[in-house]
Amino acid sequence: MSARPILALEAVSKSFGGLSVIQDLSFAVLPGERVALIGPNGAGKTTAFNLITGVYPVDAGRVLLDGRDITRLPARKRIRAGLARTFQNIRLLQHLTVLENVMVAQYARSASLVGMLQPVNLLPGNRWQREARDALGEVGLAQYAEAATGSLPYGIQKRIELVRALLARPRVLLLDEPAAGLNPAETEALAAQLEAISDAGVTLLVVEHDMHFIGAFCRRVVVLNFGCKIAECDSDAVGDDPRVREAYLGADQELAAAHA
Amino acid sequence: MSGYLEGVLVVLAINIILAYAAFLPIVAGQLNLGVAGFMATGAYVSAYLTNAQGWLPVPSALAAMGATALLALVVAVPILRTRGIYLALATFAFGQVVVAIILNLDVVGGASGYPVRGYLGFPVIATAAAAVFVALYCLFHTRFGISVTAVSDDELVADQMGLSVRWLQTAAFTIGSAVAGLAGALHAHHFSYIEAQYFNVLLSIYVVLYVLLGGTQTIYGPLLGAAVFTLLPELLRGSAEWRYVIFAGLILALMTWRPQGVVTRSLLRRLFEWRRPPAAEAT
Amino acid sequence: MLAQQLVNGLMLGSVYALVAVAFTLTMGVLRFLNFSIPGIFMVAGMLIWAMLKGGISLLLAVPAALALGAVLSFAVERLTYPQMRGGNHFIPLVSSMAFLILFENLVLIVWGSDQQRLLLPFDSVSARVGNVVIGVPQLIGLATAVGVVWVLDLVLKRTRIGRGVRSIAEDAETATILGVSVGRVVPVVFLIGGVFTALAGALFALNYQQASPFMGEEVALKGISAMVIGGMGNIWGAILGGLVIGVVETAAIHWFGARTVDIWVYGLLLAILFVRPTGLLTSALGGGGAK
């Protein structure tokens, strides 16, 4: 296994209107790893994702993908470079069918004028459609291919978003709370699916609150609080780390005080 | 074919072309209230080429289409920096400015109108309409069609998924405007006379409204919209004003009860299921 | 010469200002570009002409026009506001366009397409200040416009309903939670807009002694430019924008000819949209957001 990280943040900082949201954040993910990014609400986890995928530019620091500095790379080129993501609040496209939704990510693999003019919707047999249908079929969602996204159950929509991200054939996959809102059965199915993805060689960086899920699935954990990394350790050791306990306990204490 | 029927069909053909000119930007999330301005550009460029340069009408029309595309490309840069209602306002303002400029160009007749040499009859115009339909049908069913819909639905996601949002918006705007230019050129060479005042904001409004009436979810909506708008007075034998009154009433009814337009994806699906028994489920 | 042009411009501008206020109210409060406003402007002007022609006194005609403006605006509200609640600002825009078409064509059916000349029941009186001639009716128009907007400003700041309007402009959902009766405030916004627009139409018809079924498109539509220049959602900005447009138009006619007016007025709108879309003054109503 190569020692070079496939994803690395170096001293990344970000402020919004004077409010510092991410401070001097550095961590690295090795190829094929499964790393969790945890922290109390408001710790900056989704912001970190947004900085990695290019939703906003960083104020300071660098983001590296497989050694390549992508700090200035426009967002649309990052997925083309192999970095895909899902969203905390499901963001499926309302005016497209499920099939079309997942097909959107295929462009990242053929980003050119020719790629844009591929007649993917003209005749049903073309390879892009087949690939998308197969991808849905692999996770048991084939029957939803022609459905409108708006009326589907939450759990199904979440899984569709994952299929969409995968169709970009990423090397690194960022998952923002993939288990949120799923019932235990769905969570197990998700874990199985993520196992398969990881076994296929995709590096996973997961934001999650479900510690049980993380403990079972991720080997390493990076802990954020107030935009800083406060700890980084193996997932089985994270519960014992006093700084982590204080971060979550602190949050709990605030919660308790608020309800008093 | 009787002259009367031919006249109606020519207007229908041009309206269909205009419908697709407005359709593509709408799919991309842009309400182009300056469609008439681009139509005017195409009309006047083509007329100038046949009148002053002695070109034949068909190459003039094509060149006019290209010139309109160029103009659209140039204004797309600032206009597409705006969004939503600002974009609609910018296209509206642009359309007004273009027509006002033409009004002041005495070389093409200014305020008195411009007679046009080079006649194009029904066969050419019908062919053009068919060609526009086929071209847009194909375009809509490529990845481009999915991509512009994605951009209009959620720009952030489109960007994150690797789509070039700016490029797609510009392409939709430019292609739509070029098609409007073609409609203008055909109009000029069929009616053999154009005046700037014809290409006013109300014309843009009518086009946008009948496209919305037809429905923008599918490629067939604009056909229906153009057909309803063109054939309504013929069916009702009323005056031109009454046709517009009824049209306005239809729009109001539609926006209240069926804002997505008449032809929707689910409607198409239901129609297909009715014509063909459901196939065995593929496993 | 310059002063006379300026004065003429301000007189014309007062008409634009009233229309711009109507536009800016619905835009600022409801994020809705109300294309029916030019239609109401035109109907009011035509009604004044028709009534004067029928021998009805001006004292009756003007209130009638204002009342009609209110009624038509209310009709627009009834049919467009329900759709706004879905958060879709696009559908009400489309409906308002349909109303414009409806009003224009109904008037065409009833009165034909000719431009009509108003016969005023009084002789036009002018005052002379130095080298500048000011028509008294125009002066009354300007004073009315400013006065009416001043009253509106007071209403928005001092009355309960005014506060309701401002809170909806700020955030409609929060306003509802805070107990603002949106269902009662919104029609008021439309009614005020309708009356202002009708007043503008009446003033234009009386001051320039003309009315036509196309005066909505030709005149009132420029109110949009005025609204944007002054800043959407700002009623004093609308006055400023209206006066600016009035002066620009008058200057353009004087120096470049009447045919160039639209280039200047809409070119200015285009420029503002590109360079400073929020307009010259910031929004006091809290509205005019990006989408």
Image (cartoon, rainbow, N blue to C red):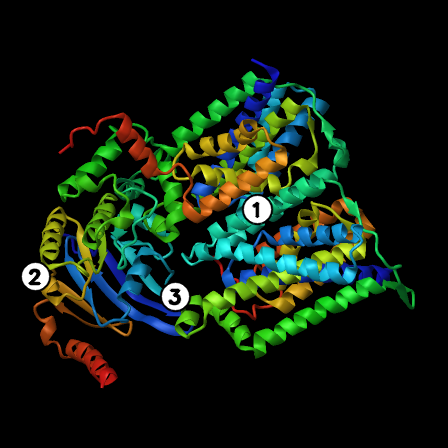
* Residue annotated with mark 1: B91
Task: Specify the quadrant of the image occupied by residue C284.
Answer: bottom right
Which image quarter is the N terminus of chain C in? bottom right
Host chain of mark 2:
A
| Mark 1 closeness class: few <14, some 14–19, many ≥20 residues within 10 Å | many
- In front of the other: label 2 or label 3? 2
Q: Position of residue C113 (x, y in %)?
A: 72, 40
Host chain of mark 1:
B
C75 sits left or right of C64 in the view? left
* Residue annotated with mark 3: A59
Labels 3 & 1 near each other (Cβ < 8 A):
no
Q: Tell me the distance, in whole angstroms, between the alpha carbons under discs 2 and 3.
A: 35 Å
Q: From what the image shows, is residue C144 above or below residue B105?
A: below
- Label 3 in the same subunit as label 1: no
Q: From what the image shows, is residue B64 above or below residue C70?
A: above
Q: Position of residue B100 (x, y in %)?
A: 70, 42
Labels 2 & 1 near each other (Cβ < 8 A):
no
Q: Which mark is residue A216?
A: 2
Amino acid of disc 3: Asp
Amino acid of disc 1: Thr
Would you say residue A248 is visible in this rendering?
Answer: yes
Q: Residue furthest front?
A: C55
Task: Specify the quadrant of the image occupied by residue C227.
Answer: bottom right
First in sequence, mark 2 or 3: give its number: 3
- In front of the other: label 2 or label 1? 1
Q: From what the image shows, is residue B276 above or below residue B143?
A: above
SS label for mark 1: helix
Q: Tell me the distance, in whole angstroms, between the alpha carbons under discs 3 and 1.
A: 35 Å
